[in-house]
Image (cartoon, rainbow, N blue to C red):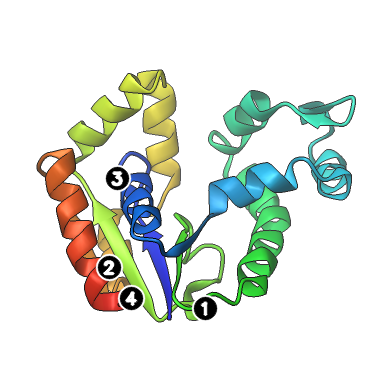
Amino acid sequence: MNVAIIGGIGSGKSEVLKVAREMGLVCLSADEINAELLRSPEYVEKIAAQFPECVVCGVVDKPRLAALVFSDKESRLALNAIAHPEIAKKIAECDADPLVVELPLVLESGMKDMFDEIILVTAPRRERLKRLQGRGLALPRAKAIMRSQLPTFVLRRIATRTVENTGTVEELREAARNLLRILCE
């Protein structure tokens, strides 16, 4: 059983993944996989070939790359074409059952069919912006990232389950625990 956790930035996906880890489930995160890949010289070379201005002395300038890809759709698609196959390979290499994966771009990455269940975590836009600002993200940048992501109504079409994150963190955690128990135990 492969379970994807999807949703827009600031929706609560990471908290749901944290609950899954606390339950002892094997978990992966696309962001964590990407961070690992950024330590690979071969991966960095691919990024440097496409975005030479974003790689200095063999190290990706993540803020510069993020500013570029969240403001330019073609750049975002080019980066995704590099990252998504590598992330998919890492997920496929994990033979855990069940496996829970935080994968915000499940549809854009073409990985939808790798999953038996897709949990969409949603939250009101205002709440998401507030959370992102609490993480130190400037409001214009937070809005740019949100604009670059698929809208919730599109994600609802592919989700098999939805967790509405409209209450407290503990309410989200309880809803996540209950759903993950049903799906994975």
Give the residue pinned by disc 4. 184
Residue 180, label in figure: 2
Residues tagged 2 and 3 counted as in contact (Cβ below 8 A): no
Quarter of the image with the N terminus in it: bottom left
Near mark 4 (Cα within 10 A), the count class, few <14, some 14-19 or many ≥20, is some
Q: Secondary structure at mark 3?
A: loop
Mark pair 2, 4: CA separation: 6 Å
Q: At label 3, which amino acid type do we have? A: Gly
Mark pair 3, 1: CA separation: 22 Å
Residues tagged 4 and 1 counted as in contact (Cβ below 8 A): no
Near mark 1 (Cα within 10 A), the count class, few <14, some 14-19 or many ≥20, is some
Residue 74 visible here: no
The residue nearer to you, when weighing 152 against 172, is 172
Q: At label 1, which amino acid type do we have? A: Met
Residue 114, label in figure: 1
Quarter of the image with the C terminus in it: bottom left
Upstream in sequence: badge 4 or badge 1 = 1
Q: Secondary structure at mark 2?
A: helix
Q: At label 2, which amino acid type do we have? A: Leu
Q: Position of residue 137 (x, y in %)?
A: 41, 21
Q: Secondary structure at mark 4?
A: helix
Q: Position of residue 82 (x, y in %)?
A: 73, 55
Give the residue pinned by disc 3. 12
